[in-house]
Amino acid sequence: MIGCTCEVCTSSDPMDKRTRASVYVVYQGVRFLVDTAPELRLQCVANGIDAVDAVLFTHAHADHILGLDDLRRFNWLMKRPIACYGSARTLDSLRRMFGYAFEHAPDSPHSRPHLELNVIEEATFSVGEARVAPIPLMHGPMAVLGFRFGRFAYCTDCNRIPDSSIALLQGVEVLILDALRKTSHPAHFSIDEAIAMSRRIGAKRTFFTHMTHQLKHAETNRELPDGVELGRDGMRIKA
């Protein structure tokens, strides 16, 4: 946190160094990026990411989209536009916030990412051979999306999962789930709420994401039940 000298912000443990929430998923031969966090360039460099076939957006809050411009490096590497998927509301926000990316600019062809926007709602959709299921979630009063890729699901930024969406998550073996802090929040699960939701969904392994600087990595992990742990930057998971 800017201007903070708490024990997490000043920690020497590399597990306490967190960038904003995003995940890279390789599924059925398709390379997905979920959200474009402000640190996207640093995240990709640190983890050797050199190809993205499709970008899925959970919602259009700044901490999930402000790295969008860095997608143009993947246009250059892959010599093609990148398909992006999100709700109509999310994609409208992207057009408004990154207007230059969607305007015809023959005098400056390399100054913007080349993106193909695709509206999704609640129906399962295909990208290549991969079938992806959107998972409707509530982020306070705001409707957002999680995503299921076979046995793996990613549900960040939520404080309520409707019963119909819990049904869509049955059989998931690895779950990434929002868990902001120990105390309650109007738009995010607390640690205890996230533990309870993980048990209700029944995933074999759950990793928490979107944590604040109020959660020290090693100390918090010691307090969590078996099968549940904090995620960390650079973590690689097989599902």
Image (spheres, rainbow, N blue to C red):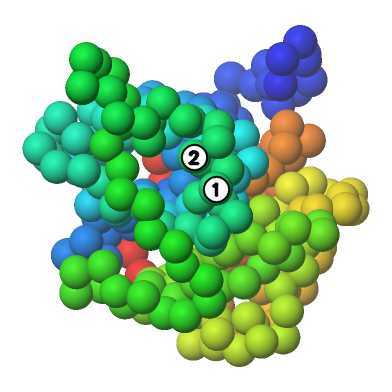
**Residue 62 appears in the picture as rendered:** yes
Q: Position of residue 184 (x, y in %)?
A: 89, 53
Instruction: Return the residue nearer the eye: 117 or 148.
Output: 117
User: Residue at 28% across / 18% down in the picture?
Assistant: 111
Name the mark on residue 92. Answer: 1
User: Residue at 47% across / 46% down in the picture?
Assistant: 35
Q: CA distance from mark 2 to mark 1?
A: 5 Å
Q: Position of residue 24 (x, y in %)?
A: 36, 50
User: Residue at 10% across / 37% down in the picture?
Assistant: 79
Please determine whether, in this image, residue 127 is positioned above or below residue 6: below
Amino acid on which disc 1 is placed: Asp
Q: Are marks 2 and 1 in contact (CB under 8 Å)?
A: yes
Q: Which residue is mark 2?
A: 95
* Residue 140 in the figure: left or right of residue 202: right
Secondary structure under the numbered disc 2 in the rendered image: helix
User: Residue at 67% across / 68% down in the picture?
Assistant: 137
Instruction: Return the residue nearer the eye: 118 or 198.
Output: 118
**Residue 178 appears in the picture as rendered:** no
Q: Position of residue 53 (x, y in %)?
A: 23, 52
Residue that extends furthest to the top in the rendered view of this protein: 3
* Residue 17 in the figure: left or right of residue 25: right
Please determine whether, in this image, residue 55 is positioned above or below residue 216: below
Q: Position of residue 117 (x, y in %)?
A: 37, 52
